[in-house]
Image (cartoon, rainbow, N blue to C red):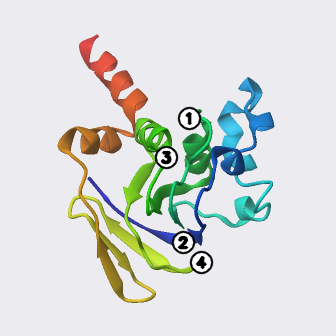
Amino acid sequence: MKKLRGKVWKFGDHVDTDQIIPAERLTSDNNDKLGTFLFEKVRPDMVDRVGNGDIIVAGRNFGCGSSREHAPRALLQAGIVAVVAESFARIFYRNAINVGLLPVECKVQADEGDVLSIDVDKGRIVNETKGTENEFQPFPPFVQELMDKGGLMAKIKEEKRCTK
């Protein structure tokens, strides 16, 4: 798998999927632009400032709420490549893996704007700004393979191309 490096966007506990992307934005006309509505009701300026490769650091129960996969897709479309949280709502965690968004369960001390490096293979997060390091349980090989391919759908599409 890869190493990631990005700027931190800080959130607290219980960030639900409706905060990530409001339900009224979940129309078929918006599928390719979900990221433009990211956190529009709770942090409307964020979408204009987020950069490709940025990372969210949050508290407990990130992604609670609905079971829609639109929330992790919106994060990816906006440029977020990973969410590091103390814990995740289980359906969000699985949806993140399915769409290729890295969900890392780890308590990390970071402030907004800090720079994190994540070594997925070694299970290590370094806060380059503060000089601190945290460890997390590396993903099993089958999950690493899914993430390397860009998620479940990308893996299935690749396998279909290989069998033709």
Q: Left or right: 11 with respect to 93?
A: right
Q: Local crowd at mark 4 within 10 Å, few (<14), some, or many (≥20)? A: few
Asked if the residues shown at circle 1 and circle 2 are in contact, with their CB atoms under 8 angstroms apart, the answer is no
Classify mark 3: helix, strand or loop: loop
Disc with the residue nearer the chain's start (4 vs 2): 2
**Above or below — where is 158 with respect to 114?**
above
- Name the residue beneath numbered marker 4: 112
* Dot label at residue 69: 1
The three-letter code of the residue at mark 2 reads Val
The residue under the point 23% across, 56% down is 138
Spatial CA distance of label 1 from label 2 is: 22 Å
* Dot label at residue 8: 2
Asked if the residues shown at circle 3 and circle 4 are in contact, with their CB atoms under 8 angstroms apart, the answer is no
The residue under the point 78% across, 65% down is 45
Spatial CA distance of label 4 from label 1 is: 26 Å
Asked if the residues shown at circle 4 and circle 2 are in contact, with their CB atoms under 8 angstroms apart, the answer is yes
The three-letter code of the residue at mark 1 reads Glu
Spatial CA distance of label 4 from label 2 is: 5 Å
The three-letter code of the residue at mark 4 reads Glu
Question: Which is in the foreground here, disc 1 or disc 3?
Answer: 3
Q: Left or right: 139 with respect to 24?
A: left
Q: Which quadrant holds the C terminus?
A: top left
Classify mark 1: helix, strand or loop: loop
Q: Position of residue 15 (x, y in %)?
A: 62, 55
